[in-house]
C-alpha cells in the first residue's frame, strides 16, 4: 500500500477533490464510499461505466491549485533563494 492509499485511511474531510488520475474504483472511490465520503473525481475517458460527479465543485479545485501556484511563486520572491550565490552550483560565494 502506497501513494494515496495511505492518506485515504485517515481522511478527515467529507469530500475529496481530485483529478482523473485518482479515478480508480477499488483503490479510491470504493474506499471513500465505505467511509461515507464524497469523491469529486471526473471519470477517465476510457472508463466503461461513467460516474457522475459535481462539476461545479470540481471547478473550485482549479481555483485551489492556482492559489497554491501563486504561493509558490511569491515564496521564491520573498525568500530570494534563487538570487543568492550560495544556491548556485559553484557554491563559492
Image (tube, grey):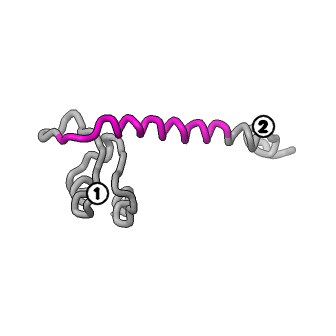
Q: Residue at x 12, y 41 (%)?
A: 49
Q: Position of residue 92 (x, y in %)?
A: 84, 45
Q: Quadrant of the N terminus?
A: bottom left
The residue sitting at the right extreme is 93
Specify whether 70 is left or right of 54.
Answer: right
Q: Which residue is mark 2?
A: 83
Q: Secondary structure at mark 1?
A: loop
Q: Quadrant of the C terminus?
A: top right
Q: Nearer the viewer, residue 70 or 5?
A: 70
Q: Position of residue 64 (x, y in %)?
A: 48, 40
Decide whether the magenta segment is chiefly helix, strand or loop.
Answer: helix
The residue sitting at the bottom extreme is 10
Q: Position of residue 19 (x, y in %)?
A: 35, 41
Q: Residue at x 36, y 46 (%)?
A: 17
Q: Position of residue 74 (x, y in %)?
A: 67, 38
Q: Residue at x 25, y 41 (%)?
A: 53
Looking at the rendered image, the disc whose residue lies closer to the viewer, 2 or 1, is: 1
Q: Which residue is mark 1?
A: 37
Q: Residue at x 72, y 37 (%)?
A: 77
| Residues drawn in magenta | 51-74
Q: Secondary structure at mark 2?
A: helix
Q: Is residue 53 rendered magenta in the image?
A: yes
Give the CA distance from mark 2 to mark 1.
45 Å
Amino acid at each position: 500500500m502506497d501513494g494515496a492509499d495511505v492518506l485515504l485511511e485517515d481522511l478527515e474531510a467529507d469530500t475529496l477533490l481530485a483529478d482523473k488520475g485518482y479515478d480508480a474504483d477499488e483503490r479510491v472511490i470504493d474506499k471513500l464510499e465505505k467511509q461515507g465520503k464524497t469523491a469529486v473525481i471526473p471519470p477517465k475517458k476510457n472508463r466503461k461505466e461513467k460516474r457522475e460527479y459535481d462539476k461545479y465543485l470540481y471547478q473550485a479545485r482549479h481555483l485551489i491549485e492556482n492559489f497554491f501556484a501563486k504561493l509558490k511563486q511569491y515564496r521564491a520572491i520573498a525568500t530570494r533563494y534563487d538570487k543568492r550565490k550560495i544556491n548556485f552550483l559553484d557554491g563559492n560565494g
